[in-house]
Amino acid sequence: MKIGLVLEGGASRTLFSCGVMDGLLKENIMADYIIGVSAGIAFGVSYASRQRGRNLLIARKYMGDSRYMGARHLFSPKNRAYYNLDFVFDEIPNKLIPYNYKNFREFQGRCVAVVTNVETGEAEYLDVPASDTKWTLLRASCALPLLFPKIEVDGKFYMDGGVSDSIPFEQAFRDGCDKVIVVLTRERGYVKQPEKASLAAELVYRDKSGFVEAMKTRAERYNDCIKRLEEAEAQGKALVIAPEKPLGVSRVEGDPRVLETIYVRGLKLTRRLMPEIKEFISEEEK
């Protein structure tokens, strides 16, 4: 039986997911297939390399550091993103908190990042290459409209995967998973509202009609996706791990104490759900 791990994005909210992933690693539970959006997959690669605690260490030491994110980076001609891209995707994994590329190469499953094609507005699902130590694909998956530039990957331009497919559990099934563990960064019952930024995006990306349409319909498609996920859960094909109440932080939260609190919430919930998780991934049929 092939088990998938599906990771919603949410920038700083994704520290909740980091707690969940470390809870799984503590029990030596490794999915056969990992797919994520934006910060979901950016943090998810530490799960793939079995580096328990690495994401928490990044949050503690660097997410509150002015080198990590801030408006000044957005206005830097060499960066043009709210996040300091070279610091986040190069200096941290390659110098400050080394990423275990060997473990990642030895991962037997697939690790997939969701990106949105800027020309078409459609989702594309690309395998994360262990050979790219600058993490270009992860930069693309995290590239929030208005806060990031378009990121080029193999001659195409991409932005935030959440624009086109925020919770890619159906792609996990299309790629052969029998069951999926889906980690959300919004509480159950959350209903997404149209984003105010979509109006500005219409102006900025006005020559990319498919991308603009994806931005305009994002909330509606997200809410429909949640309904289909609930159906898959009722059928026993999905196990959803979500915050029990709103996390109460913005996507650019940098306070290490707040981030650690969110992480601990994910970790504790996973520990409590562990009997259910182990039963869910068991190959025994009832």
Image (tube, helix red, strand yellow):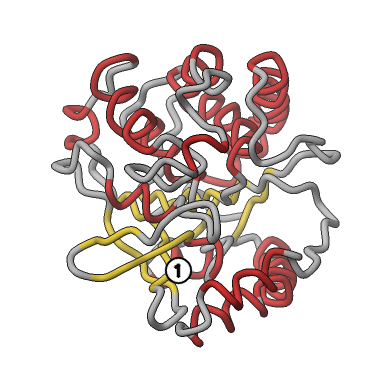
Residue 19 shows up from this direction: yes
Query: Residue 103's spot in the image, x, y percent?
Result: 22, 28
Query: Residue 225's spot in the image, x, y percent?
Result: 66, 71
Query: Residue 69's spot in the image, x, y percent?
Result: 52, 32
Tell me the kind of residue under disc 1.
Answer: Gln
Q: Please count the marks in the image.
A: 1
Which image quarter: residue 166? Answer: bottom right
Query: Residue 255's spot in the image, x, y percent?
Result: 67, 19
What residue is rendered at 41% in x and 83% in y? 120
Quarter holding the C terminus is bottom right
Q: Is residue 45 left or right of residue 169?
A: left
Q: Tell me the residue that label 1 is attached to.
A: 171
Residue 1 shows up from this direction: no
What residue is rendered at 43% in x and 19% in y? 54
Quarter holding the N terminus is bottom left
Q: Is residue 41 left or right of residue 251?
A: left
- Label 1 Cα neighbours within 10 Å, binned few <14 / some 14-19 / many ≥20: some
Front residue of this view, candidates 165 and 198: 198
Residue extending furthest toward the left: 131
What residue is rendered at 41% in x and 74% in y? 118
> Element type at marker 1?
helix
Front residue of this view, candidates 177 and 204: 204
What residue is rendered at 68% in x and 61% in y? 233
Front residue of this view, candidates 126 and 274: 126
Q: Is residue 3 left or right of residue 106?
A: right
Front residue of this view, candidates 250 and 101: 250
